[in-house]
Image (cartoon, rainbow, N blue to C red):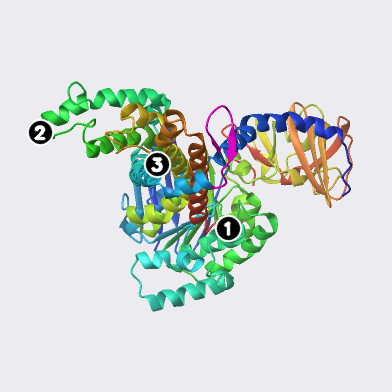
Amino acid sequence: MTLELKNVGLRFGAETHIFPTDLKLEDGSFNILLGTTLAGKTTLMKLMAGLEKPTSGEVWFAGKNVTGVSVRRRNVSMVYQQFINYPNLSVYENIASPLKVGGTPDIIIKQRVSTMAELLKLTPMLDRRPSELSGGQQQRTALARALVKDADLVLLDEPLANLDFKLREELRDELPKLFADRDCIVVYATTEPTEALLFGGNTACLFEGRISQFGPTGDLYRKPRDIISAEVFSDPPMNAAGIEKKGNTFHLGTKARWDAAGELSGLADGTYTLGIRPHHVSPVSRGEQPVAVDGRVIVAELSGSESVIHFNMDGSTWVSQSHGIHPFEVGSQARLYADMSKAMIFDGNGRRVSA
Amino acid sequence: MNKTINNAAWIFVIPVVALVAFNAIIPLMTVVNYSVQETFGDNVFFWHGVGWFQDVLESRRFHDSLLRQLGFTFTILFIEVPLGVAIALAMPRKGPWVSVCLVLMALPLLIPWNVVGAMWNIFALPDIGLLGRGLNALGFDYNFTRQPGDAWFTLIAMDVWHWTSLVVLLAYAGLVSIPDAYYQAAKIDGAKPLAIFRFIQLPKLKRVLTIAVLLRFMDSFMIYTEPFVLTGGGPGNSTTLLSIDLVKIALGQFDLGPAAAMSLIYFLIILLLSWIFYTLMMRNEAQ
């Protein structure tokens, strides 16, 4: 059972919501759609589910063309950012609802609902209504509803976004376990790169209606194919600046320069874009190839054990994120060190050229 | 926490107290005053106890108009609430037609009550009105000034025309506030339209519908201008609702005592019924 999008696109009049996309999701896989708000995550999910009909291309599921097949006749389930349950049904009836519509016998419904409730720690709440539950419990109910019918495709659209911090962490730990022994395809949409890294699996970076890259999550993070994937997969935002290569040396601004190492030394002279993640820029000189960069401090945030410093460097804003407390005066000149061995170099078309 | 005692605060409260006393408490107390006294003119009053209340509660006339009032109110509630919800469901959710529909719906609400009454009076006249003439041309023996049934039909049609829009607007506001995800989730579950209405739309509309029913109940129970202009309570007394009867007693016959007692009873009935409605409809919310 694989889900395959073949050249699937969606446009409304002159407005393109999803550019023609090819994507193949394997049986039993956990897939993450990573992208900012309005990148098209929800729309892409609706296309996968059959809630929305693509204006071009085909959706194939388990070797069958399901383009335009109504979601009612596909075995799909979905959990939303808002807690969506039937307001005047009890938790039990809510979890049972997809089975009831399908005409499952009562005894089996009872059995499956109680297993599901046990798994999601809802057993004491089965008689309550959704409005009498906490946000976390409401979302657990919605999850139970999605899981109880053994769907082939489970779509989770930012399910943790509306939960507060503690509940989010708790449910985030449980989620992979819930899907561990199921052979359904899971698609999880999120705006947070950290969440994608915690879940692992595969990630598709989505930017303005296009998938810029799809592959194993770790690979995508370490080796983004282009500047868009690198930016989508970076929080706080990736630092970028124009650089120039002359001979075997990179020049950033007027002062910062460093030698091209490894396969970068073979790079032709010219202008490139440098991308470096905030945690590779630090107030202390460390790493394999630290290069000093100077700038004026705009924001200095100290949070417990971490310092986040925003500074203006040659007209562009950079962020440094480092462990330890490093107090900086806002408005003062600061010297920070970027570990250029971790930097990514992109060519004029935004393709990454470094290893 | 210790509260500081500041007598100057009274000064700020006095204007409100004075205003409320002037426009609500004093007139109400005047009515209470009249309701327990008897007069033979010359501004001389005698204590009459609860006599007027007994008279009113026992009078055939009051029973009849109360029954007519209840009949009218429940009839229009049974028509306007389901009809209003049905129209709201049929209205478009997005696109240019939304504002057109909303304006059309709001129009009847903007017309003054006596104008509505006058409009329908002319509209329903059997000799020259479009409705009256039309019905007669179709073979119905329709004359709302002579036949009680026709008068009731016209009265109810007028109220439905005037006030269904209010229910529509409230229900529509409730419907558009339901997130799209609910409908998608129901679709994924395979729920039919009727189930979507029963398990998503109706529960989500509960609050606005409670407001709609309460507003329509109170307004229709106190209705005066429209039936006064349309039928004047006739033919005979067949459309004499409570308010019309009250005005007849108070200003027509100038029986201040019975009128005052009736006003208070009228007020208490509205208060009681509103409370019962609200409690019944909000029964499950409080838990």
Q: Out of A71 and A326, give the one closest to the viewer.
A: A71
Q: Which mark is residue A9?
A: 3
Q: Which residues are magenta?
A: B38-50
Amino acid carrying mark 1 in the image:
Ala
Q: Which secondary structure lies at badge 3? A: strand
- Counting labels gives 3
Disc 3 to disc 1, how far (Cα)? Answer: 48 Å
Q: Residue at x 62, y 30 (%)?
A: B23
Q: Are the residues under badges 2 and 1 in a single subunit?
A: yes
Q: Which residue is mark 1?
A: B286
Q: Position of residue A293 (x, y in %)?
A: 82, 35
Q: Which secondary structure lies at badge 1? A: loop
Viewer can see residue A291: no
Q: Which residue is mark 2?
A: B139
Q: Position of residue A261 (x, y in %)?
A: 73, 44
Asked if labels 2 and 3 touch by Cβ distance under 8 angstroms, the answer is: no
